[in-house]
Image (cartoon, rainbow, N blue to C red):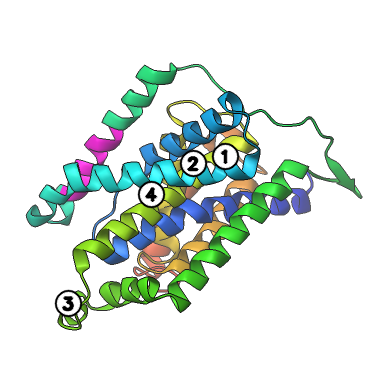
Amino acid sequence: MHVLQLVINGIMAGTILAVPAIGLTAIFAVLRFTNFALASHATIGAFAGYVANVHFGLPILPAVFAAFLIAGMVGVASDELVLKPFRAAGFITTAIGSIALTIALENIVRFGFGNELRGYDLPITRDWRFNGIRIGPQQVQNLAIAVAVMAALFAFLAFTRTGKAMRAVADNPMLAAIKGINADAIGRVVSFVGMGLAGLGGMLIGLDTTIDPLTGFRAMLSIFAAAVVGGLGSIPGAVIGALVVGIGEELSTLVLSHDYRSAVGFLAIVFVLTLRPRGILGQRAY
C-alpha cells in the first residue's frame, strides 16, 4: 500500500484516538489515577449513539452529542458510586477497581445488546480519489468532529471559570482548595467530560467500522499508549501521542500483519518510557 495513504489513514485514526486519550489524561491529571473504565464508557457511548441514530433516526451530529452525554452521565455515576470509595486506598487500588468496573459495564452492554456486530445508519458514499489516494467522506466527517470537539475543549479550559478551576486542581490541589475551589465538584466535572469524550470517541471509532460490547476494550491499549507517549496529565501531549500511535499503527502494516497493529501501542509505551519516562511533553497539567 502507498506510504502516503498509510500516513493519511494514521492521521485520521490518530485524531479520533486523541479524543478518548484526552479524556483519560484529564481524569489522571485531576483525580490522580488511571481510569481504565474508560474502555467500557467508550463502548457505552458507541451504543448510545447507535440507539440515537438507528432507533430514533437522529443524524450523526445529534447522535454524537447523545454518545457524549450518556457516557458522561454514566461516568459520573460510576465514579461516585464505585471508584470514589477506593481513592483513599491509593491510585493502584483505584486503578484495579476501574478494571473490575469496566468488565461489569461491558457485560451490562452485552446483556442489553448481545454480541453481534452492529453498524450505524449511514448514507452509502464513494471514496474520494486523488492520484491513487483514497479518502472516505465519513473519515473526513469524523476528523472534523474530532477537531471541533478538541478545539471546544481547549477553549473551555482556557477561557471558562470551570476550565480554569480544573487546571488549578490539576496543578496544585491543596492550593486550589485554599483558594476556595471545590475539588469534589471539579472531580465530577472532569469525570463527566472525560468519560463523555470516551463515549464520543467510541462512537467515532464505530462510525468507521462496526460496534460490539468489546469496542472500547479493543481500543484501550492504543488510547492508553497515546496518553502515556504524550505524557500523562498533558492534554496537548495526548494529541501528539495519539498521532504518533495512529500513524505508527498504520505504517506497521508495511512489515507486520494487520493482526499485530495493537502491539504498536505497547511498543510505543516501552520505547518512549525508556528514553523519556515522563512522555513527550512530560507530566504537565493540561
User: According to the image, label 4 marks what residue?
Assistant: 195
Contact check, label 1 and label 3, Cβ < 8 Å = no
Contact check, label 1 and label 2, Cβ < 8 Å = yes
Around disc 4, counting alpha carbons within 10 Å, would you say few (fewer than 14), some (14 to 19), or many (20 or more)? Answer: many
The picture places residue 3, in percent across and down from the top left corner, at 75, 51
The answer to whether 171 appears left or right of 244 in the picture is left
Q: Earlier in the sequence, mark 4 or mark 2?
A: 2
User: According to the image, label 2 marks what residue?
Assistant: 67
Q: Earlier in the sequence, mark 3 or mark 2?
A: 2
Range drawn in magenta: 94-103
Around disc 3, counting alpha carbons within 10 Å, would you say few (fewer than 14), some (14 to 19), or many (20 or more)? Answer: few
Q: Earlier in the sequence, mark 1 or mark 4?
A: 1
The answer to whether 285 appears left or right of 264 in the picture is left
Q: Earlier in the sequence, mark 4 or mark 3?
A: 3
Rounded to the nearest whole Å, what is the CA distance between mark 4 and mark 3? Answer: 24 Å
Q: Amino acid at mark 2?
A: Ala
Contact check, label 3 and label 2, Cβ < 8 Å = no
User: According to the image, label 3 marks what residue?
Assistant: 177
- Which is closer to the viewer, label 4 or label 3? 3
- Which is closer to the viewer, label 1 or label 4? 1
Contact check, label 1 and label 4, Cβ < 8 Å = no
Residue 284 visible in the snapshot: no
When asked about the image quadrant of residue 98, the answer is top left
- Return the mark for residue 63: 1
